[in-house]
Amino acid sequence: MTILNSYIAVNYMRIEHRQLQAFGIAALPNVALAGMFSVYCIWLASCLFLLIRQDRRRHSAATGNSALLAISQPPPDETLYRVPIMIDQKINWSGYIKFALIICIILLLMYFIAALIEYSIWKTIFINEISIAMYFVVIAIFLIALAFVARSYAKVQLIVADTGLIKKSSRGDQFMSWNEVRLFAIDAVEGGKDVMTNFQTSYHHMPTLFEVSSAKDMLQWRFLRPPRWYEIAFAQPVMGYVVYEQQMQTLLAIIATKTKQPLYDLR
């Protein structure tokens, strides 16, 4: 009877061990997804903090705070422009592919690390094909959805007219009359004031996001830069960076001329 009880106990322990193994490896995708969600929450919190800080500085600049004036001001010159000017951008598929590959590598590394932890505990790895398949299906759906979002986000057209600035995008059309502009500013998205040098210096020392605001509305646009090897850019100019650079410099000069507003730096 004692031998029988011992045999039952050993088999029960083996079954319980296998069940724990199956549960542990089945949880690996959930651990990886939980890690992704945690990183996203941290990123979202930092963006929220940045938006609150930027809104305070925007109100301060609108009241004429000279401490927020940009170090370099675009030169107003009536001879620089002939309107209308159309500035177009499109999706940069090479940048999207680079981003998708990085995401896949990170997720695979997270899965591999979780598997190593499982092996260090149980000395074996139980392969759950359904969980692995679901894991990769979620990744594929995420990347496909991101491709549509990136394409929609990247397709933007700016039209510089004699009466104002028009922005056409997937989110609709915006128009800002020169007479309504009360604030012309660099938005606080990335970098600090120490990277703001002269407007005629290299691409990579330039701010990337500008805005013009009226009492009720705000129109923002991005000044694209040629990405360096370690940077990811979802958008690129249709006409190439040389022509695009000339167009954007002209746009800044037109705004300074037409609105008579100085450029503020909200970073």
Image (cartoon, helix red, strand yellow):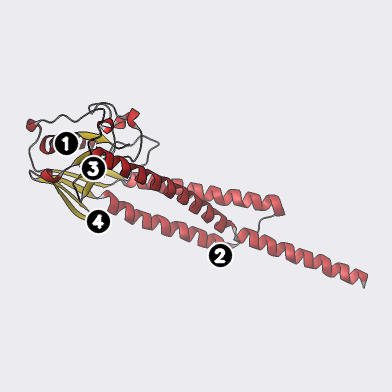
In the rendered image, which quarter is residue 64 located in? top left
> For the residue labelled by badge 4, is the local secondary structure a helix, a strand or a loop?
loop
Q: How far apart are marks 3 and 4 (CA)?
A: 17 Å
Residue 224 pos. (x, y %) = 27, 39
Q: In which quarter of the image is the C terminus?
A: top left
Residue 187 shows in this picture: no
Three-letter amino acid code at the position of disc 1 = Gln
> For the residue labelled by badge 2, is the local secondary structure a helix, a strand or a loop?
helix
- The residue located at (50%, 51%) in the rendering is 38
Asked if marks 3 and 4 touch (Cβ < 8 Å), the reply is no
Judging by the rendered image, the residue that carries numbered circle 2 is 130
Left or right side of 33 for 197: left
Question: In the figure, 141 relative to 70: above or below?
Answer: below
Judging by the rendered image, the residue that carries numbered circle 1 is 261
Mark 2 or 4, nearer chain start: 2
Q: Which mark is residue 211?
A: 3
Q: Distance between the residues labelled 2 and 4?
A: 39 Å
